[in-house]
Image: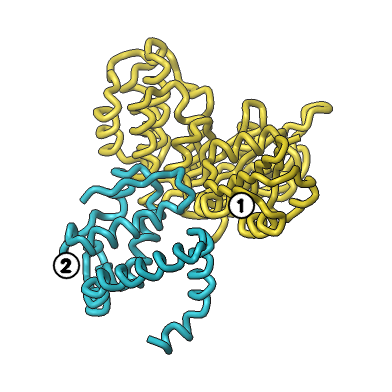
Chain colours: A cyan, B yellow
Amino acid sequence: MFFKLTPTTGQPLYLQLMQQVRHAVETGALQNGEQLPGIRTLAEELVVSPNTIAKAYSELEHEGILELRQGSGAFVCVKRRVLNLRDHMPSVQRRIRDLVDRLRDDGLQDDEIRRAFEAELLNPVEVARNA
Amino acid sequence: MTAVIQTRHLSKSYGRVQAVHQLNLEIKRGCITAFLGRNGAGKSTTIKMLLGMIAPSAGEGTVLGLSIRDAEANREMRRRVAYVAENKPLYGYMTVGQTIRFASSFYPDWCADRAKDLVNRYELPIDRRVRLLSKGMRTKLALLLAFSRRPDLLILDEPSEGLDPVGIEELLESLAGQAAEGTTVFFSSHQIAEVERIADYVCVLERGRLMVDASLDHLRESYRRIELVFPSAPLEHDFCISGVERIREHGCAVSIFASGNADAVVERARDLHATSIEIAPVGLREIFLETVREG
């Protein structure tokens, strides 16, 4: 698995690593049960602080994408929820694309749409109820 | 997270020149912290005060919880801290091998296997006298002496000086490896691109004062450059918003350098009917230059 972190994009490196692992899992480049490099190995390989790797791994564990096993490292462990999500992702993306297209037709600019989305997402409880 | 290095109002003056002014540093355990600043900003003076090599004019500090002003505490501290000095002082008449054997006898935490590994990795000529080494080789030898130990804290003053790009890469890999073993790393550097990759935290010193003290994650998320165009030239005080560090105007175009609060700037620009709004992340180089060129 190859990861590439870009220090100048305005996004924390641990978030970049999380996205790349997530993406690798979604595309199947990383399979369920597969082991990821150890913190030290990956830190030396990417030449970043080990804390960057540790933070990304630990957040990914919270998301249910990785399992950290004491003394033996990090393993891809895609929970059912994530698998469901992966199956639904194409239709989710299609629906969002349709909505974005309609909003653009209404004359909204992309960052206005983004801000509207973000404002809506600030209320996670309601989102959960509706779902 | 506890602080490995802590200073309160630490100051040093030479006659009327204030080399370090009221420095409040807090270096976190288990992290890699980079210490940036122009030549003469007071970085080496600060490091030497921390190590007890020069006495502060005022203020207090602790390293690993040990007072930097106490001679007894200083001896204990130096056993647990590995330090690579700016000028890499080594004995010129010794060979590389003799230097390594000599240093190994002083440190209980010496790892002979690691020293051997590093000699090979750094391709050091074991029988050559130190005075015949190139600048880069000399730096590598000094680094080897520090990296062959298992210190609680590693302090490096300009460790990449004299190294070629391959040497710098090896140095950074070693720093990552040391940090992975739990060693706290505090290093001064001019290599901003490298610092940006490896450091968890960055402190910027300018004329003896601490100008930036933040995590790189925070800098990445908060600092933005916002380029705006208006139908007519706006007033500068329109952008007196907290987080706005610098405003440059050129007719109807305004460029804002912000350390945070970019959303509020954009909001204000909309209220003022900006015809174009562009937000871009800001790299460490730009943050550094904007900071040290201030005033």
Residue A5 image offset from top left, x and y in percent: 36, 47
User: Measuring 33% from the left and 27% from the top, which residue is drawn there?
Assistant: B166
In the image, residue B138 sits, relative to residue B191, either above or below, namely: above
What residue does disc 1 label? B26
- The CA distance from mark 1 to mark 2 is 42 Å
Outermost residue on the right side: it is: B16
Residue A39 image offset from top left, x and y in percent: 31, 54
Residue A18 image offset from top left, x and y in percent: 34, 59
Tell me if residue B76 can be seen.
no
Q: Which chain carries label 1?
A: B
> As drawn, is A34 to the left or to the right of A128?
left
Outermost residue on the bottom side: it is: A129
Residue type highlighted by circle 1: Glu
Q: A58 or A87: which is nearer to us?
A: A87
What residue does disc 2 label? A32
SS of the residue under disc 1: strand
> As drawn, is B184 to the left or to the right of B124?
right
- Quadrant of the rendered image containing residue A26: bottom left
Tell me if residue A117 can be seen.
yes
In the image, residue B98 sits, relative to residue B79, either above or below, namely: above
- Quadrant of the rendered image containing residue B206: top right
Q: B215 or B282: which is nearer to us?
A: B282
Q: B123 or B243: which is nearer to us?
A: B243
Circle 2 crowding by C-alpha within 10 Å: few under 14, some 14–19, many from 20 = some
SS of the residue under disc 2: loop
User: Measuring 51% from the left and 80% from the top, which residue is drawn there?
Assistant: A123
User: Measuring 23% from the left and 77% from the top, which residue is drawn there?
Assistant: A84
In the image, residue B168 sits, relative to residue B257, either above or below, namely: above
Q: Mark 1 against mark 2, which lies toward the viewer?
A: 2
Residue type highlighted by circle 2: Asn
